[in-house]
Image (cartoon, helix red, strand yellow):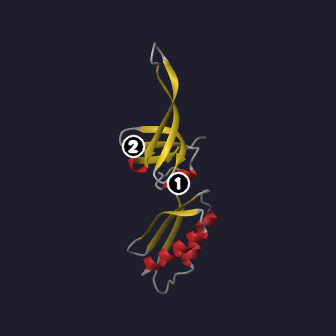
Amino acid sequence: MLKEKVDKLLQAVLDDNPSLFLIDYNITNDNSIGILIDGDNGVTVEDCITVSRAIEHNLDREEEDFSLEVGSIGATASLTLPRQYVKNIGRVLSVKTETEKIEAELVSADDNEIALKWKAREPKPVGKGKHTVEKEAVIPYEKIVEAKVMIKF
């Protein structure tokens, strides 16, 4: 019963704030509600307050006792949804697949895959020494084990 109410309230507040999207949401056995959001333009404290109030003010504590926590995805958290990749186009990602780890610029992302571009030093085809080559990779989401935005200071 609580879950159905929260589902509807959460969907309504996200519909009213289309730049925000849900990353994770759960309700424990003791009615502790945890909501994790992200946004196309990041998430502000006000965004978290908006989501929290939309849910808290529409639930009756006399009916069911609950606790509510609304948070935003951290800067070092793994990317999980295509929408998160799209908002990070142009940034450097660290992408792990089952066979390799690539640190590269995210140049495109759609509903099925991402495209990365980076420079690498490789041995020259003829002679001694190394030269810099441009590399590219297209990786389907199902092949990605973990992807994180690299924070540069």
Provide residue 116's location: percent of width, then percent of height.
50, 40
Q: Amino acid at mark 2?
A: Thr
Query: Is the residue 153 above or below the residue 67 in the image?
Result: above
Residue reaching furthest to the top: 127
For image coordinates 55% across by 74% down, the residue present is 12
Of pointers 2 and 1, the one earlier in the residue sequence: 1
Q: Which residue is mark 1?
A: 84
Q: Quadrant of residue 41?
A: bottom right
Image vertical order of residue 124 relative to residue 3, above or below: above
Quarter of the rendering occupied by the C terminus: top right
Q: How far is disc 2 from disc 1 in space, using C-alphas? A: 18 Å
Tell me the number on the disc at residue 56: none
Q: Residue at point 37% right, 74% down? A: 29
Badge number at residue 97: 2
Quarter holding the N terminus is bottom left
Q: Quick one: 137 or 72, which is closer to the camera?
A: 137
Characterize the local packing of mark 2: few (<14), some (14-19) or many (20 or more) Cα atoms within 10 angstroms.
Answer: some
Q: How many marks?
A: 2
Residue at 39% x, 47% y is 143
Position in image of residue 70 (x %, y %): 53, 67
Q: Secondary structure at mark 1?
A: helix
Relative to 56, say whether 18 is above or below.
above
Residue type highlighted by circle 1: Gln
Viewer-nearest residue: 5 or 126: 126
